[in-house]
Amino acid sequence: MKQRIRKREQDPDIAYRISILLRFALCVLGLLFVRLYWLQIVDYDMYRELSENNRIRIRTIRAPRGPIFDRKGRPIAETQGSFDLVCSPIDVKDPEEVIRFLSGIVEFDADEDEIIHKIRDAMKTNPYTSITVARDLRFEQVSVIEFNREGLPGFSVSAEAKRSYPQGSTFAHVLGYVSEVSQEELKKSDDGRLGMGDFVGKYGLEKAMDDTLRGTNGGRRVEVDAAGRDQRLVEEVPSITGGSLYTTLDLDIQKAAREAMGNHAGSVIALCPKTGKVLAFYSAPAFDPNIFARGISKLNWQALNADLMKPMQNKGLQGTYAPGSTIKPFIALAALENRIIDKNARVNCTGALRLGNNNFRCWKGAGHGPVDMHQAIVQSCDVYFYTMGLRLGPHRIADMEKGVGLGTITGIDLPGERKGLIPDPEWKSTVSKERWMDYESLLLGVGQGPVHVTPLGMVVGYATLATGGKVMKPFVVTKAVNMDGKVKEWEPETLRKLSWDRKNTEFVHKSLASVVNDYGTGKAAKLPGITVGGKTGTAQVVQIKGKMIKSEDLPYEIRDHAWFAAFAPVEDPKIAVVAMVEHGGGGGAVAAPVVKMVLQEFFRTEAASEPSAASASPAASSPPVASASPAVTPPAATPAKPPEKLPAEGAN
């Protein structure tokens, strides 16, 4: 009899539990599979990079910045080698301790707290980047650091390219300076060429032409040990040097401008009237751009900005001043062009002009007596030009002055230009809701009142006067050679041509020549063998009522500004120069000698560049010799006439 084996029935409760466990196990295995897929496939690149970064470091090779040359090919900005102390934040364990130790060896670019804060920020944002913490290390400093490398994880010495300005402060304001890129600039950068620690142009040509001058960084991939020390070079990509700039500036003339200004504050600008090429552009006091190239400390930056002489301001481009008597040739030309007065007509200067209840004094208290236009320009008679200001009115004065470039943006290829102010009734109505008064027109005739111009605007104005009405755009850069070898060149650009009567401009030229060469106020600018035409200017800073006080007897900050504007030779102008000396007093005594030194250097270099002139010159130090022109004499005196009747109050 077969024994039947009865099948044991499974407990339903146990079966349910086993089913749950199997499902849970399958879920866990599924999650593990998904996680493995995510790590090995989706996030492969990220984890591979993290793994590589544990042993590989990227050492940035800073690209050398392109050079800048003067018009004769001499470097005025270049790049030099420098030993710098760099830090890889990921390898630094205790920034405070290491920085305190290093402070006894090197001079940091900033305060210790700033350096520590910079390293800690980099640890959070980009720990694998390289940060420069000290520049221009001396040999003995490099030796000490290398000797202590075991105790300085994350720090190493690197050979870097550093911006250098061989002429120091001479070209400071026109070239500008470079400094480390800010976080805001990094965020705005869209070309991928900027990185933390890079240097960019912050001012002047360095800023305006930064894209051309800044090169492309290279880099080295190096294998490091646990302490972050370089062990093996894995790969190297060389940097690409930035492009080159060729300028119109002349090193010798710029040096002459600097020496001529001495300890004065102000500006000297020289350019070619027929082309607009800027030969010299100096602002004083200046700063040394080399201190920015190695990283300026916060204390030094604050000291520069707190200096009352404003060394960081480009006074030729951004300073605006009352033009004083330098405006008188334009007033005279406007009067001739508008047929307000005949050049031979006389105005009697008694030492003051009365308008309403006020007396407007001439600089010569005893008066000049009856003077015609030529005599008024040469002797800078205020009463004559008060009269012309009243007769012309603000609109015709503004048309003339803005036409030649005063109170306008000239368009020079330097950043930060200000235009100044040429006032008129519409301006006054907008600003103060008041009507224009006659005394304001009177003051415009002598360059006082709310009128303000820049030295750059003034030199463009005198260059326009020199060419007979051709307004040229001033420019500094003539050629740029990019990193890829492509060349871009700039040619002279005519902004406008003013339709002046040639006889009128020739008359004004002769009068300006007499200012310097005969019996005028600009004798200090006279050159042997060269006819210089120019005009002095003394611009009041504050109005002094009562007895006239000499400018030199006033406190410095309220002394008059001194101007002198000139061009030469008058018969064929090759150069126009303007000097503006802040609180210098009289233009003839202070500013005219500055212009003379610049003119002397220009004609010396011009003579040296011509073989025939150079061979004929007995000595290099001899005065410059040019085609001599006969001395310009004033027009023949005309019979005395009674002074012209002044316009009634309210007339223009």
Image: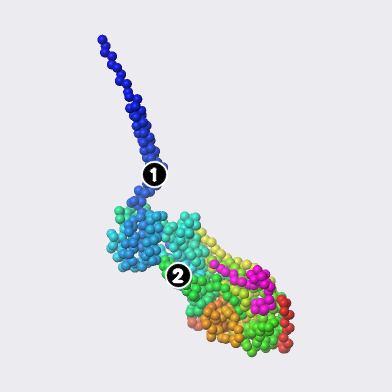
Image position of 214 with respect to 403: above or below: above
Res. 100 visible in picture: yes
Type of amino acid under label 2: Gln
Q: Left or right: where does residue 82 sit relative to residue 378? A: left
> Residue 427: horizontal and vertical position, in percent?
65, 70
| Nearer the observer, 639 or 93 | 93
Q: Which residue is nearer to you in this view: 266 or 212?
A: 266
Q: Earlier in the sequence, mark 1 or mark 2?
A: 1
Gap between marks 1 and 2, in whole Å? 49 Å
Residue at position x 60%, y 87% from top? Answer: 547
Residue highlighted by disc 2: 302
Element on which disc 1 rests: helix
Q: Is residue 105 above or below residue 224?
A: below
Residue 616 point in image, percent of width and height? 52, 81
The residue that mark 1 highlights is 44
Image side of residue 487 versus residue 652, left or right: left
For the residue pair 310 and 368, the one nearer the viewer reads as 310
What residue sits 54% from the left and 67% below the top?
A: 416
Q: Residue furthest bottom?
A: 366
Query: How far across and how far down the image is residue 491, in percent?
Result: 57, 65
Magenta part of the chain: 416-444
Q: Secondary structure at mark 2?
A: helix
Residue 319 at x, y = what percent? Answer: 55, 73
- Residue at coordinates 26% horizontally, 11% vertically from top-left? 2
Q: Nearer the viewer, residue 431 or 395?
A: 431
CB of mark 1 within 8 Å of CB of mark 2?
no
Q: Is residue 256 visible?
A: no
Eye-nearest disc, 1 or 2: 2
Tag count: 2
| Image quadrant in which the N terminus is located | top left
Residue type (three-letter) at the residue carrying disc 1: Tyr
